[in-house]
Image (tube, rainbow, N blue to C red):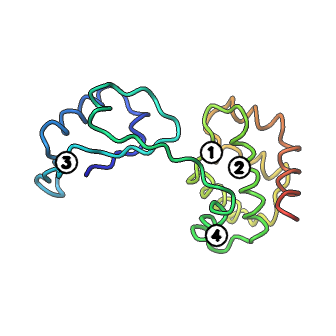
């Protein structure tokens, strides 16, 4: 089995390369292993923003859509991946991220970007979210200027709601 993450974000050349690999039933990994035979012609492709794949690749792949986690699960992920973050700040930042994902943004923040943001807030000795702290760190979890503009327009409201909904 071959796992290819975010294939929907790849270019046409990579898709053609992957089809070639699947047709040969083997994958070569330079300097790691000479060749690994494929047990079957399947691959898994989890994705949060699917693009249209070619019919040839669709026949050979199982395409999975994995939704963003519920807030409780995302809080647990943050707690485990960012030791030392307070429960209060963890609840607030997850509430904020969950709200941002509901906005019309080009790229909703992934869980890994939530983790990155939590780590930055910890390094900055953040104790709770406030509009200034959020504004100064938006580029950690938002990757496009237009997304930053969308969130900045609603920054005070989003921050207030996140703090309130986190029970603080």
Which residue does the numbered mark 1 point to in the structure image?
109
Question: In whole angstroms, how far apart are the C-alphas of marks 1 and 4?
Answer: 18 Å
Residue at left offset 38%, top offset 37%: 7
Which residue does the numbered mark 3 point to in the structure image?
40
Decide if residue 120 is on the left or right side of residue 159. Answer: left
Among the 4 quarters of the image, the one containing residue 14: top left
Nearer-N-terminus badge (3/4):
3
Q: Spot the residue most to the bottom.
A: 84
Which of discs 2 and 3 lies nearer the camera? The answer is: 3
Question: In whole angstroms, how far apart are the C-alphas of marks 3 and 4?
Answer: 37 Å
Question: How far across and how far down the image is residue 134, in percent?
Answer: 78, 50
Which of discs 3 and 4 lies nearer the camera? The answer is: 3
Nearer-N-terminus badge (1/3):
3
Residue at left offset 82%, top offset 62%: 128
Which residue does the numbered mark 4 point to in the structure image?
79
Question: In whole angstroms, how far apart are the C-alphas of marks 1 and 3?
Answer: 34 Å
């Amino acid at each position: 089995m071959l796992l290819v993450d975010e294939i929907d974000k790849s270019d046409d050349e990579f898709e053609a390369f992957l089809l070639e690999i699947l047709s040969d039933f083997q994958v070569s990994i330079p300097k790691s292993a000479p060749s690994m035979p494929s047990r079957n012609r399947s691959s898994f492709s989890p994705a949060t923003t699917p693009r249209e794949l070619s019919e040839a690749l669709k026949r050979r792949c199982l395409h999975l859509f994995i939704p963003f986690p519920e807030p409780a699960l995302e809080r647990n992920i943050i707690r485990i991946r960012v030791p030392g973050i307070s429960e209060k700040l963890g609840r607030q930042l997850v509430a904020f991220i969950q709200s941002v994902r509901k906005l019309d943004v080009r790229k909703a923040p992934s869980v890994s970007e939530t983790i990155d943001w939590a780590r930055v807030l910890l390094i900055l000795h953040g104790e709770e979210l406030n509009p200034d702290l959020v504004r100064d760190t938006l580029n950690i979890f938002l990757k496009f200027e237009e997304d930053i503009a969308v969130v900045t327009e609603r920054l005070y409201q989003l921050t207030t709601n996140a703090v309130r909904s986190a029970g603080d």
